[in-house]
């Protein structure tokens, strides 16, 4: 029974999450030869202050981009 974890930034629509769940299940079913009912997908959403790269949160990166954007 494959269990897949997917971490996303918050803000995706229900439709997008349903579509990715279907696409992942299809890919896993096809490549691993298991039934779709065996595929588990755990989607965890993170806010912009709960994800960082190089010590800079996504929220801070957005702030910095807004300040440096030409008007």
Image (tube, rainbow, N blue to C red):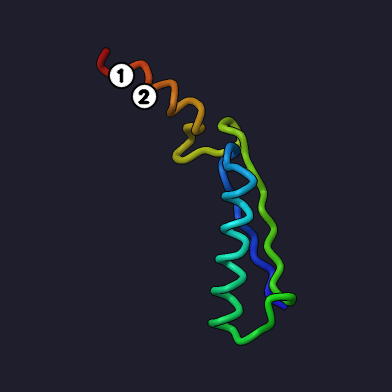
Q: Which residue is mark 1?
A: 68
Q: CA gap, disc 2 to disc 1?
A: 5 Å
SS for callout 2: helix
Q: Residue at x 56, y 32 (%)?
A: 48
Residue 60 screen position, x and y as percent: 48, 25
Q: Position of residue 50 (x, y in %)?
A: 61, 36
Q: Is residue 62 left or right of residue 23?
A: left
Q: Residue at x 64, y 65 (%)?
A: 4
Q: What residue is pinned by disc 2?
A: 65
Q: Is residue 34 above or below residue 50?
A: below
Label 1: how many Cα within 10 Å (few below 14, some 14–19, many 20+): few
Q: Residue at x 30, y 19 (%)?
A: 68
On the image, which quarter does residue 38 sit in? bottom right
Please tell me which residue lies in front, 26 or 32: 26
Q: Is the residue under label 1 in contact with that under label 2 (CB below 8 Å)? A: yes
Tell me: 10 left or right of 53: right
User: How many numbered marks have been drawn onto this rendered protein structure?
Assistant: 2
Q: Is residue 11 above or below residue 33?
A: above
Q: Quadrant of residue 26?
A: bottom right
Q: Single out the residue that lies furthest toward the bottom.
A: 33
Compared with residue 54, is residue 5 higher up or lower down, i.e. above or below? below
How packed mark 2 is, by other alpha carbons closer than 10 Å (few <14, some 14-19, many 20 or more), is: few
Callout 1: SS: helix
Please state the horizontal and vertical placement of residue 47, each as a whole percent of the image.
61, 34
């Amino acid at each position: 029974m494959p269990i897949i974890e997917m971490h996303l930034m918050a803000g995706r629509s229900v439709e997008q999450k349903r579509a990715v769940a279907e696409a992942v299940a299809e890919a896993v079913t096809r490549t691993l030869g298991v039934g779709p009912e065996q595929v588990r997908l755990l989607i965890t959403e993170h806010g912009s202050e709960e994800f960082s790269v190089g010590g800079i949160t996504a929220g801070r990166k957005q702030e910095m981009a807004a300040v440096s954007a030409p008007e």
